[in-house]
Image (spheres, rainbow, N blue to C red):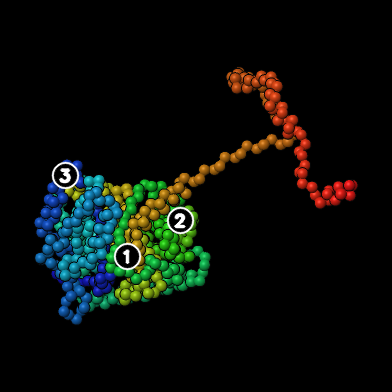
Amino acid sequence: MSPVRLNPLDAAWILTEARATPNHVGGLLQFRLPDDAPREFMRELIAEFRSHRDFTPPWSRRVKFPLSLNPMPIWIEDDDIDLEYHVRHAALPWPGGERELGELVGRLQSSPIDLSRPPWECTIIEGLDDNRFALFVKMHHSLIDGVSGMKLLQRAMSTDRERSLGMPPFWASGAEREARAEVPPPTFANVASAAVKALSGQVQTVPQLLSAFGKIVKRIGDPGEGMVVPFVDSPRSVLNSRIREKRRFATQQFSLERMRTLAKAADCTLNDVVLAICSGALRRFLLERNELPERSLTAGIPVSVRAKDDEGTGNAITFIIAKLGTDIADPVERLEAIRTSVRYAKAHVQGLPRQVMEQYTMLLMAPTLITILTGIGGRVPPMFNVTISNVPGPDKPLYFRGAELLATYPASIVQHGLALNITCQSYAGSMNFGFTGCHSAVPSLQRMAVYSADAFDELEEAILRPPPVAPKKASRPRTGAKPRAGKPATGKAAKSRKAKAPKPVAAKPLVAPPKAMKRKAAKSRAPKARSPVATKASRARKRKAA
């Protein structure tokens, strides 16, 4: 393969690499061992992984800084890949649960990747309960983004258990080569025509871009409903502080059917439910630490929307900012606030043509990229408070070497000023949440995963199971009101009333009270004797009479 020069954005991920801010993403894949798996299954899997020497891009690439006038790094093929370094083995004290697995993944996510080698690592983890094992694969963001990386990992699996037995490791089933489009001859006329076309396209989009950003500027100082203004509507919080190198990782899983049922009952989208779950967990987490801002937190959300001029089925990926309603205690009102804010943000970008939308997204994200490149994040007001992504995944179960894939949990990047990242991915009827956070800025991240489950239950309780209406008390008849004259009962009704009629109670004869009770009654009726103590006036009357 001939050297490939990195584009400026991919190069930025390498140039901004630091000990406290490693720029790699990861994926945690949990499997269940086959029923007939021998005791040596894991040992044989590790040995086979380390002996497989066939590599495909991008897993075979490493970065190189050329000694030329162009300072941009390039990708070259590495012919000497050390699988003893790239394929690793870890074990949890049996039986390992989600908490222990999250702590291990947090430590693995904390260490930077060696950029002198192909920038990826794979750790095989055993010791999990319920007959499970896991793979944690991390890759540098300059090599591949998290969504594409998860797709490449899933390409190494099959929906058929038997077929999966002979499939190679994921680094041997990389990206498929795309068919190259026909390139016009490099003549002066073609180059000039392409330049004029690109320039005219840029000029035509300027008025629409100015109009789009002008609507955002008009929202400054407006307390009513509408689009979120970046930097202005996002309060400072502990989530937007400086970070350190250690990471925390936690997971949570929900039934996709439950989430869709809730979304249908609440008349909102699945993405709105995801945001409401995260909002409820964030609100409780920050309340316990007495660090919940008075104003609502905001979320940066990558979304897929239909462009104005798109007549096909394709969608455009853009970036919106929406309120999370963390200042609202009621879960139903909080969900409504989220739905309203997302609707305003989507309506704003959906009115743009595709070319304008791409440029709008690039300009909107420019401040965030500048803070990453300059390292000033956490020292300036945040553009938004937290990143929340919802990535669609395969809807059918996958298998690898006969082992069923149970769940996939994304692990993403945190930066100065963005100490928490929440990414979820759907898979085979479930929604899997991955919480990645800075150890010092967001301690006890496992609690947030637990609180997300409580927030989902709270939403279901409020929307699907409303509180029962108290029965009305029977009204008393008014004083002096005559009872209604009913028709005489006949047949079975008359017999049942006779059967239920109370029997008359015979009067008991009076019994003369005993003598002791008579004496006690006479004593109680006798007048009480006055106190022998005489008053001063009574003594004076006695002396006068004497």
- Identify which residue is drawn at 33% across, 66% down: 440
Q: Kindly identify which numbered label has been placed on residue 505.
A: none
Quadrant for residue 506, please give it.
Answer: top right
Quadrant for residue 346, please give it.
Answer: bottom left
Q: Kindly identify which numbered label has been placed on residue 335.
A: 2
* Crowd class of label 3 (few under 14; some 14 to 19; many from 20; radius 10 Å): few
User: What's under tag 3, amino acid-wise?
Assistant: Ala
Which label lies toward us, 2 or 1? 1
Q: Kindly identify which numbered label has been placed on residue 438.
A: 1
User: Residue at label 3?
Assistant: 37
Q: SS at mark 2?
A: helix
* Crowd class of label 1 (few under 14; some 14 to 19; many from 20; radius 10 Å): many
Residue 110 in percent (x, y) is at 26, 64
Residue 262 in percent (x, y) is at 42, 49
Q: Is residue 403 above or below residue 329?
A: above
**Mark 2 and mark 1: span between their CA atoms?**
27 Å
**Mark 2 and mark 3: span between their CA atoms?**
46 Å
Residue 400 in percent (x, y) is at 19, 50
User: What's under tag 2, amino acid-wise?
Assistant: Leu
User: What's under tag 1, amino acid-wise?
Assistant: Cys
Which label lies toward us, 1 or 3? 1
Q: Earlier in the sequence, mark 1 or mark 3?
A: 3
- Identify which residue is drawn at 29% across, 51% down: 427
